Amino acid sequence: MTDPQVLDVAVIGGGPAGLIAAEVLSAAGLSVAVYERMPTLGRKFLMAGRGGLNLTHSEGFERFVERYAAASERMRPMLEAFTPADLTAWAEGLGQATFVGTSGRVFPKALKASPLLRAWIARLEGQGVALNLRSTWTGWNAAGDLTFETSEGARTVRPRATILALGGASWAKLGSDGAWASLLAARGAAIAPFKPANVGFTVAWTELFRERFTGSPLKNIALSFEGATSRGDALAAGYGLEGGAVYALSATVRDAIQARGSARLEIDLRPDVSLSQLTARLSKPRGGQSLSSWLRKAAHLSPVEIGLLREAHGVALPVAPDALAAAIKAAPVILTGAQGLERAISSAGGLSFEALDGLELENTRGVFAAGEMLDWEAPTGGYLLQACFATGVAAARAVVAQLGAP
């Protein structure tokens, strides 16, 4: 057996959390190697780039922290130490100018991830980071060394510290499959069950609606569930509803369905028009127009919105102006299930904060964790990437503090 590779820090996982940790560690003068089981780095990061690469969000900090719900106070100090402004400055430092969209989301002007990732990898290589691909972590051996299966066979590594940035359990084909959970559970670490997050939900559409409107966007709507409201866009999928406005409520909706079997969502198809204004529009003479034509002209509803209104109310769809306006402002849709992890943008669950001292595993000292493998969740809108970067930076700084300057 060959002797283990010796170095200061091994970073396992080549996504945003792992790569930013490697950047901070190497900038501090430590010898760093990244180990990634896929053939290339940042696959999920590149996938996010297909939607423009929403890096973070420009909203006020307190509202930003609230997006992490139950984990908000755990996340607060790490977000304070690496803020949305810090992430924006980091991207611009790599030559990628950014802009704030009308929704407050922050994007690179290139609206894709590949230029940023190329510049980032070049920086890491310039700082001496060793990038090891096709290297699957398999745990520890009896001597406490890290073990890997690589394209060249088994390999062992003996770092002074380790950062795990192995991702959650969504989009397994991009590298994050949650397989690490059994390795940490065997060492006594508490693992919360994985659940899909930022995911679409099943709706029992009629065959007519499904055939006519699958893939049709629902623009600028408001969704309400149990006192919470989300504004934005959604999409009528063949299986149900998906999209940013849905994802913002997905955690509470998912848990409600798990507890009760279904969840009743209300959709305001015209959130910028008051009930009285809409009633007044619908009170004008209709003449000989069909109801669908009247709804298009008087309420400016699109065909898919009219279809959804009929799905929600069926034969009970009212025609009296006040009742029809109320129906448009609160169309009920019954959600009966969440799509699985394979279709989820992100995952909830993972390594419990209760298993950590800061970000260091209590049962395995010298091993730290970061990124989506930790038990937190947040909606889309820049909050996912921001948390991955912030926890990666926090883990790296904790390692630097523990090891000291070289």
Image (tube, rainbow, N blue to C red):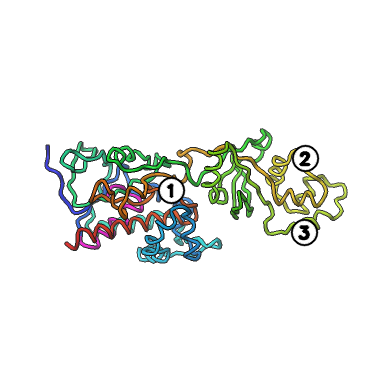
Q: Position of residue 198 (x, y in %)?
A: 50, 47
Q: Which mark is residue 47?
A: 1
Q: What amino acid is labelled 2 in the image?
A: Ala
Q: How many marks?
A: 3
- Residue indicated by mark 2: 316
Separation of residues labelled 3 and 1 (CA atoms) = 44 Å
Q: Nearer the viewer, mark 1 or mark 2?
A: 2
Give whichever of discs 3 and 2 has the lower sequence position. Answer: 3
In the image, residue 51 above or below residue 191: below
Q: Image point 28% across, 37% down: which residue?
A: 186
Give whichever of discs 1 and 2 has the lower sequence position. Answer: 1
Is 84 displayed left or right of 268 in the figure? left
Tell me the quarter of the image containing the N terminus: top left
Tell me the quarter of the image containing the C terminus: bottom left
**Range of the magenta residues?**
11-29
Crowding near pointer 3: few (<14 within 10 Å), some, many (20+)? few
Q: Image point 73% across, 41% down: which residue?
A: 313
Give whichever of discs 3 and 1 has the lower sequence position. Answer: 1
Q: What element does badge 2 sit on? A: helix
Is 87 displayed left or right of 325 in the figure? left
Query: Which image quadrant for residue 200?
Result: top right
Given contact means CB atoms under 8 Å apart, are the residues at marks 3 and 1 in contact?
no
Q: What element does badge 3 sit on? A: helix
Q: Position of residue 34 (x, y in %)?
A: 26, 50
Main secondary structure found in the magenta portion: helix
Q: Which mark is residue 276?
A: 3
Query: Which image quadrant for residue 188?
Result: top left
Crowding near pointer 2: few (<14 within 10 Å), some, many (20+)? few
Q: Position of residue 117 (x, y in %)?
A: 36, 55
Q: What element does badge 1 sit on? A: helix
Q: What amino acid is labelled 1 in the image?
A: Met
Crowding near pointer 1: few (<14 within 10 Å), some, many (20+)? some
